[in-house]
Image: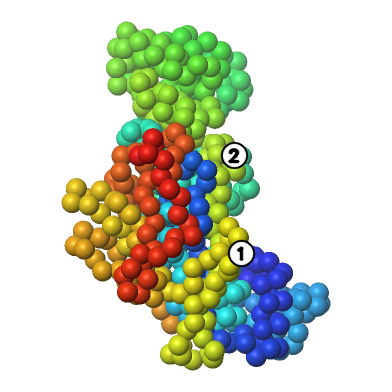
Amino acid sequence: MTTALLTDHYELTMVQAAMDAGTADRHSLFDLFTRRLPEGRRYGVVAGLGRAIEAIEQFRFEEAEIAFLLEQGIIHDNLAAWLADYRFSGDIWGYPEGEMFFPGSPVLSVEGSFAECCVLETVLLAIYNHDSAIASAASRMTSMAEGRPCAEMGSRRTHEWAAVAAARAAYVAGFAATSNLEAGRRYGIPTMGTAAHSFTLLHDTEEDAFRAQLDALGHGTTLLVDTYDEEAAIRKGVELTDGKLGAIRLDSGDLAISARRARDLLDDLGATETRITVTSDLDEWQIAALRGAPVDGYGVGTSLVTGSGHPTSGFVYKLVARADSADPAAPMHPVGKKSKNKNTLGGRKFAMRRRGEDGRAEAEVIGLGAAPVNDGNDRALLVDVIRGGKVVHSATLDDARRRHNESLAELPLAALRISKGDPAIQTLILDADGVQTTNPYHAAPNPQNI
């Protein structure tokens, strides 16, 4: 399926006007970045690059798409002919998936003709704003879980295809599994699931339901024990498995109290290896509150995949440099908005993570027009993604998960707090001579949050 019409009307009217004016082929550079993190968030997690690459490769205008655009009067014949042969032929580089980002981080840079870069704006923003917001929320949850596995279970709370993307983004940020089978098929994410309350209600008795599930899935399965009476259900599950029950799931009530009671009962019954999984609209604060409870895993849905749980990353896509011709070798002029609270930094960006002697990140260093000098502990952040229209980036989801863990471990300990606070590190802007310059995205840290 083509991704070409997953875009806004004005992308094509801009290209049409620029083509008629003779400026559509000017060599241009766009940056995708955020001016600020969501209120109170201390870091963001990059996710969506893999999906963005797929979207660019599928960005094709076939006869049906072009006919629609012509019928609606959105484009003229000259642009229709150009779109028919559209293939992105430029360069893209940026932050790899799993990396942390901060205000001003040049998460993705797209270079080519104005026209070929412009038409990608909406689809790139849609992917990055969605996936990075979910990965950022998922990272907070896995941090609060302190090594206990989290499973993504939000498919029924969002758009059916957004659910697949959400499962992928959560996996990047450390979730162990998903309930979504398409995410498992498409991305190789481990899938999990056993039974809902309806399965218990289907049968004449809870024991009949448990027997059916155990016969089908084995003693290692997870039994949902709070349909009627938790204690009676736990006793029956242990009895039916001779104390070898894999796990129980608690989905209602005061989960901390229920988990403690369940653990005591399981241990008294000799089922010391039976795990306890909890669900029921969990978020990072509830997971944090359960850290002292005997919980072995968490299932998270609504708060992860819906907008109320993952405030937008606020990514924008802005033209930051252009040449006066189509020649890629022609000098490029930095350009940027001067709008109040929406100004942008023009010019090509270079990025590195400044680290102290202890290996902890101290700043996000952005160089304008030239790469900052590495003081020996700094870590370069940008990787090539597409060169001359050819994909050169080959990182896997497992690579992204490792990068997330390593990048998060590098941040100051205050970054792991879920209370509201300023970005964990400052963004420093250096000019081409390495001199610190004004940072329009700077938010002074609050000493109480460091």
Q: Which mark is residue 74?
A: none
Q: Nearer the viewer, residue 45 or 413?
A: 413
The secondary structure type at the circle numbered 1 is loop
Q: Nearer the viewer, residue 438 or 380?
A: 438
Total marks in image: 2
Nearest-to-viewer mark from 2 and 1: 1
Q: Is residue 56 left or right of residue 370?
A: right
Neighbourhood count class around disc 1 (C-alpha, 10 Å): few under 14, some 14–19, many 20 upward:
few
In space, the residues marked 2 and 1 are separated at their CA atoms by 29 Å
Point out the image quarter for the N terminus.
Answer: bottom right
State yes or no: discs 2 and 1 in contact (Cβ < 8 Å): no
Residue 35 is situated, as x and y percent measured from the top left of the image, at 51, 57
Residue that carries the numbered disc 2 in the rendered image: 308
Q: Look at label 2 and name its amino acid.
A: Ser
Residue that carries the numbered disc 1 in the rendered image: 339
Image-quadrant location for residue 2: bottom right
Which color scheme does this rendered protein use?
rainbow
Answer above or below: position of 202 versus 110. Answer: above
Residue 335 is situated, as x and y percent measured from the top left of the image, at 53, 76
Which residue is drawn at the image coordinates 56% and 86% (left, top)?
A: 26
Residue 75 seen anywhere in this rendered image of the structure = yes
Residue 391 is situated, as x and y percent measured from the top left of the image, at 42, 74
Residue 182 seen anywhere in this rendered image of the structure = no
